């Protein structure tokens, strides 16, 4: 069977759709501590239009294709921002991590009254060294920017399957993991799709089947 590679733009869109459709499960998966402070009865805001304006100079270069900015209301009052970037391209590693720092300070400059946390999901085979740290040093001027990371290729298949019985976003992570594992094996990818369908049917999250298959 011939290998079919999903275009980066489509793959980025898959991540953004999954995060938007399952934002609460996403938050519980990656930020369990913060999730306990969020009032999920209040609607989440997806700040896509504002983000596009803030990074208008990056739009044509495609640097924001995998970005999602969410705003949550906290139980104790106030609001919290969550910036997510899905990275599949594996381009220039130094520039990429510098871009994470730029993303952070532009948003903080725009919203100084809102706390911001940042997550990069490495969805491809290429991962930079020190994937969660940007370091700058020149003439005794030093800046270190650290951010949350998740490396899909390093996930554990069985652990994701177990966690997927309780949190649907674990099944998204499983589908993304299998996307990497089956890149060069069309027959294995076909069998993987069948297994993902069965896992969904055996879980409370049957409606997710279509979204999951977009990843594989």
Image: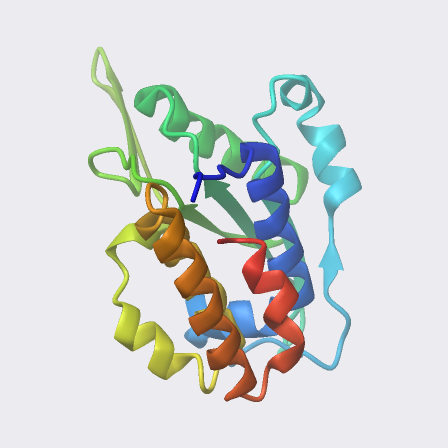
Look at the picture and state if 32 lies above or below 4. below
Q: Position of residue 153 (x, y in %)?
A: 29, 51
Nearer the observer, 84 or 39 = 84
Could you say which quadrant of the image residue 89 lies in?
Answer: top left
Q: In the figure, is residue 206 to the left or right of 145?
A: right
Residue 6 makes an appearance in the image:
yes
Q: Residue at x 62, y 54 (%)?
A: 114
Q: In the figure, is residue 47 to the left or right of 37?
A: right
Point out the residue furthest to the front here. 1
Q: Position of residue 187 (x, y in %)?
A: 38, 53
Q: In the figure, is residue 24 to the left or right of 128?
A: right
Residue 112 makes an appearance in the image:
no
Look at the picture and state if 192 lies above or below 5. below
Q: Residue at x 46, y 27 (%)?
A: 99
Q: Position of residue 60 (x, y in %)?
A: 68, 18
Look at the picture and state if 26 lies above or below 149. below
């Amino acid at each position: 069977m011939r290998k079919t590679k999903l275009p980066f733009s489509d793959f980025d869109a898959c991540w953004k759709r999954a995060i938007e459709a399952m934002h609460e499960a996403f938050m519980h998966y990656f930020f369990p501590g913060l999730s306990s402070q969020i009032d999920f009865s209040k609607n989440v805001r997806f700040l896509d239009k504002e983000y596009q304006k803030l990074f208008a100079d990056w739009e044509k270069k495609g640097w924001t294709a995998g970005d999602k900015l969410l705003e949550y209301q906290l139980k104790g009052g106030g609001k919290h921002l969550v910036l997510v970037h899905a990275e599949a391209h594996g381009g220039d590693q130094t520039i990429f991590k510098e871009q994470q720092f730029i993303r952070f300070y532009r948003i903080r400059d725009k919203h100084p009254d809102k706390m911001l946390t940042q997550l990069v999901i490495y969805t491809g085979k290429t991962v930079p060294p020190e994937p969660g740290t940007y370091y700058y040093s020149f003439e005794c001027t030093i800046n270190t920017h650290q951010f949350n990371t998740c490396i899909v290729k390093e996930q554990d298949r069985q652990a994701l399957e177990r966690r997927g019985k309780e949190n649907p976003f674990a099944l998204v992570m499983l589908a993304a993991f299998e996307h990497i594992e089956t890149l060069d094996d069309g027959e294995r990818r076909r069998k993987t799709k069948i297994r993902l369908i069965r896992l969904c049917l055996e879980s409370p999250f049957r409606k997710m089947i279509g979204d999951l298959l977009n990843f594989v």
